[in-house]
Amino acid sequence: MSGLLALLDDVAGIAKVAAASVDDVAAAAAKAGSKAAGVVIDDAAVTPSYVAGFRAERELPMIWKITLGSLRNKLLFLLPIALLLANLLPQAITPLLMIGGAYLCFEGAEKVLHKVMPHADHAVEEDMDIRDPARLEEEKVAGAIKTDFILSAEIMTIALAAIPESGLLLEAVTLAVVGVLITVAVYGSVALIVKMDDIGLHLARVGRLALTRGLGRWLVKGMPYLMMILSFVGTLAMLWVGGNIVIHGLHDFGLHWPYEPIHHLAEIASAAVPALHGLVAWAITAALDGVFGICLGFLLIPVATRAIGPAIKKLGLA
């Protein structure tokens, strides 16, 4: 009997440790996920464009393929790499974050440039002229997974940097939880967004109540505007997050401009509105980070298009 009680006591102890570990993982995952929120918004805003123009019945299968590719990116490739860096070469994390941030600035600035100065992209036009829908779908899915790899690398690196110092197992479990939850949230939202017009059309046709039919018509009419808003928000998120990452990286390396001037201006502005101190400080910081991001992005456009891009093509990596 005493042996049984001792065993039960050991089991209770193990359960307490396991419960504490779950709490630690949940807390770390929540913190890491919040830090990566800007990149997550961008990911959710960018992905619907990859399924635009395809038949309605192919949209969800394409999103499912992209989702599986995203999970593979995060769990099979990026998670082990992130853990190796954190434990063997932690000093590489900040430079890698800055490279990813600079890429986001470049992507955001390029989107702004295309919006302000639209011009035909012959490579894209040739792709869209492909008469084999299956091949076009494969290429679009592959392109989405490549883009996801970059955004996922940024998400995992940001998440890793946000996790407090802990054991290897806790870091691995936390990163896996963050990776899976963010992937489900992003691509679940994407699936809902791309099918929203179909849902609206169904409600408009078969809704029993006038209110239901009106809601359906509103969804159908509102989807183009929602996609425009998402694209706009995604671009802002790219510039804000990318600029913020690069600025913090420069600060960590001892280059305190523009980090200190931005925070000084945010403090002055927030002090003028005590009731909204936190919100004003965040808004000013995010806006100035975005201004820095778009300036950096414009500077990187000729570098990326005339030097880095051709070099990558010559190496056969694109």
Image (cartoon, rainbow, N blue to C red):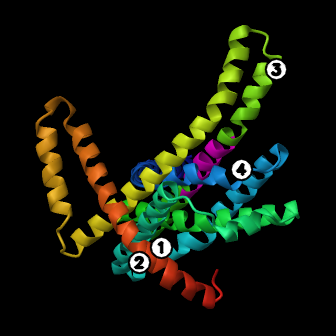
Q: Which residue is mark 2?
A: 87
- Residue 3, percent across and down? 55, 52
The amino acid type found where label 4 is placed reads: Ala
Mark 3 vs mark 1: which is more N-terminal?
1
Camera-side mark, 2 or 3: 3
**Is residue 54 found inside the magenta-colored segment of the image?**
no
Distance (Cα) linking label 3 and label 4: 23 Å
The reply to whether callout 3 and callout 4 are in contact (CB within 8 Å) is: no
Mark 4 vs mark 1: which is more N-terminal?
4
The reply to whether callout 2 and callout 1 are in contact (CB within 8 Å) is: yes
| Residue 245 quadrant | bottom left
Camera-side mark, 4 or 1: 4
The reply to whether callout 4 and callout 2 are in contact (CB within 8 Å) is: no
The amino acid type found where label 2 is placed reads: Asn
The amino acid type found where label 1 is placed reads: Leu
Q: Which residue is mark 1?
A: 83
Nearest the eye: 214 or 160:
214
Mark 3 vs mark 4: which is more N-terminal?
4
Q: Which residue is mark 3?
A: 205
Camera-side mark, 3 or 1: 3
Point out the image quarter for the C terminus.
bottom right
Task: State which region is magenta.
Answer: 179-191
Q: Which residue is mark 4?
A: 52
Q: Residue 9, can we see it?
A: no
The amino acid type found where label 3 is placed reads: Arg
Distance (Cα) linking label 4 and label 2: 42 Å
Q: Of all residues shown, which one is farthest toward the top?
A: 209
